[in-house]
């Protein structure tokens, strides 16, 4: 009965939205046009062609290069918002510190990728939790009052048996609070749990699109003999939408014109045509790599559409495409793709290409026969001025005992530069969000008061990190 009344209420709300009596906050960025319905399912503009072509206007430009003499360097898997003013908010997988696999970093470009603000780490693992090993493969979307940042993580050191997680913030650069299974903040729990062979990659690399109050969540699913993108939908009008997720199944089977070495899909909705598109990289990490394009009428089932090799760097991988905050594309906007590339493992520049989208009557893979560009990795010199992208603590979990009179300890907070070199923070650090019944903190020193566990947030300048304190008898 409750479901019946809920359906009736949603029907009348939808009717009010249609006639304009109330205004939906979920359409504040991009009103939908050229939209048609069949039995309540979104379909494409009847005048739109069945396939889409993507073209790179030129060879593009690097927005990140590894430093000369570093042990590694990368910013892969970009997820990018193209704002209405032409500025870009971008998120990347960056190396982590303290044996953590990856952190997610953020940069802002006021001019379409030509210049960028200093880098900032916005999402790091939470100790003693389901995501303590890594935060990588960002997927960003904004609707309502929040930016939602999806990411991949695991507790397995080999980087397998991954799950999908999400965090939210009212600001593009954080602070972010993670989904905890019932709400936001505290110990994170996955929103998609991998159920296959734990020795395989698992689930991850999320991408999200909001459309008419429905959130479409896409994620990689790699198991024994399986390389797919799956899709789930959720009620975007519900603040706790991860609890409403409904698995819809396979959106893409990654064979792509008999090319099997494919990675994650970044999905957007093209308003002008009323169709979803997805970009992937194919034959990744090889000299024959290229960008593939999928298209869908309903966001649930995708078909292979086009291949882009001309003006794309060889050895490319983990591609993203710009879209409005809600994951939409308007053809009147500048559109960019970005990807990592390079033939040396973990030395990957990040490149951007301005692209155009056009319609096709039939799928076209002919560009696979052309040459991509053999761009060598360009290293940059180390600079004397060091940018700090985030902080961490010397221990991620501290332990203390009530029976030991010397059980108080000092927390060593470390600042990490762009190459993840660590130095002690000598300045003021603010500690918050901890259980004052369990511990007391004065001058970076922790004093145990009662048996228990508590998380602590440390803040230095605009950077934060969460660590855990365990007090035993």
Image: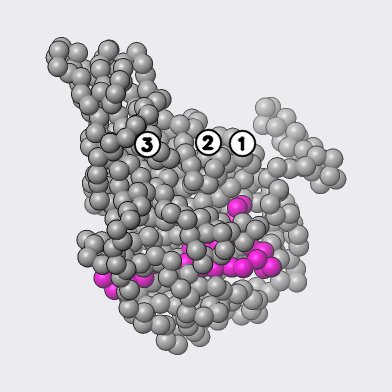
Q: Which residue: 45% across, 37% down? A: 178
Q: CA distance from mark 3 to mark 1?
A: 34 Å
Q: CA distance from mark 3 to mark 2?
A: 33 Å
Q: Quadrant of the C terminus?
A: top left
**Label 1 vs label 2, nearer the camera:** 1
The disc label shown at residue 243, or none: 2
Q: Which residue matches tag 1?
A: 238
Asked if labels 2 and 1 touch by Cβ distance under 8 angstroms, the answer is yes
Secondary structure of the residue carrying tag 1 is loop
Q: Position of residue 228 (x, y in %)?
A: 43, 60
Q: Is residue 234 above or below residue 420?
A: above
Q: Which residue: 67% across, 27% down? A: 2
Q: Is residue 109 above or below residue 453?
A: below
Question: Which residue, as the protein is rendered here, is positioned at the far front?
Answer: 384
Asked where in the image residue 272 lies, by quadrant, the reply is bottom right
Question: Which residue, as the protein is rendered here, is positioned at the far bottom?
Answer: 370
Which residues make up the magenta segment?
320-344
Asked where in the image residue 223 lies, by quadrant, the reply is bottom left
Chain-order first, disc 1 or disc 2: 1
Q: Position of residue 418 (x, y in %)?
A: 33, 54
Q: Quadrant of the N terminus?
A: top right
The disc label shown at residue 460, or none: 3
């Amino acid at each position: 009965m409750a479901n019946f009344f809920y359906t009736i209420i949603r029907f009348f709300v939808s009717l009010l939205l249609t006639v304009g009596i109330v205004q939906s906050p979920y359409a504040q960025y991009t009103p939908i046009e050229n939209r048609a319905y069949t039995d309540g399912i979104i379909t494409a503009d009847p005048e739109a062609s069945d396939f889409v072509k993507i073209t790179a206007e030129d060879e593009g430009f690097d927005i990140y290069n590894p430093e000369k003499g570093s042990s590694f360097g990368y910013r892969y898997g970009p997820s990018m918002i193209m704002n209405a003013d032409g500025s870009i908010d971008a998120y990347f997988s960056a190396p982590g510190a303290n044996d953590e696999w990856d952190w997610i970093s953020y940069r802002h470009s006021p001019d379409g990728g030509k210049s960028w603000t200093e880098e900032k780490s916005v999402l790091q693992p939470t100790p003693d939790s389901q995501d303590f090993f890594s935060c990588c493969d960002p997927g960003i979307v904004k609707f309502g009052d929040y930016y939602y940042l999806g990411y991949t993580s695991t507790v397995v050191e080999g980087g397998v048996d991954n799950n999908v997680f999400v965090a939210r913030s009212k600001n593009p650069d954080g602070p972010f609070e993670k989904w905890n299974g019932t709400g936001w903040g505290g110990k994170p729990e996955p929103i998609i749990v991998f159920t296959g062979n734990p020795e395989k990659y698992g689930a991850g690399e999320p991408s999200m699109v909001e459309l008419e109050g429905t959130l479409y969540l896409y994620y990689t699913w790699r198991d024994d003999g399986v390389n797919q993108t799956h899709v789930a939908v959720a009620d975007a009008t519900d603040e706790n939408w991860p609890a409403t997720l409904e698995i819809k199944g396979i959106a893409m089977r990654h064979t792509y014109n008999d090319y099997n070495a494919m990675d994650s899909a970044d999905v957007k909705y093209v308003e002008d045509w009323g169709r979803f598109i997805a970009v992937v990289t194919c034959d990744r990490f090889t000299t024959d790599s290229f960008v593939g394009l999928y298209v869908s009428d309903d966001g649930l089932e995708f078909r292979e559409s086009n291949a882009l090799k001309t003006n794309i760097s060889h050895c490319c991988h983990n591609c993203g495409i710009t879209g409005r905050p809600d994951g939409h594309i308007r053809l009147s906007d500048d559109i960019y793709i970005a990807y990592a590339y390079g033939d040396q493992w973990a030395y990957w520049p990040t490149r951007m290409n301005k692209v155009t989208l056009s319609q096709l009557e039939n799928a076209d893979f002919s560009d696979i026969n052309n040459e991509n560009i053999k761009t060598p990795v360009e290293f940059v010199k180390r600079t004397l001025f060091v940018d700090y992208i985030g902080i961490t603590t010397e221990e991620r979990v501290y332990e203390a005992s009530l029976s030991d009179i010397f059980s108080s300890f000092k927390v060593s907070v470390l600042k990490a530069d762009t190459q993840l070199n660590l130095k002690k923070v000598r300045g003021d650090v603010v500690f918050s969000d901890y259980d004052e019944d369990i511990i007391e903190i004065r001058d970076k020193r922790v004093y145990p008061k009662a048996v228990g566990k508590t998380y602590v947030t440390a803040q230095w300048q605009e950077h934060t990190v969460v660590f855990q304190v365990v007090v035993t008898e």
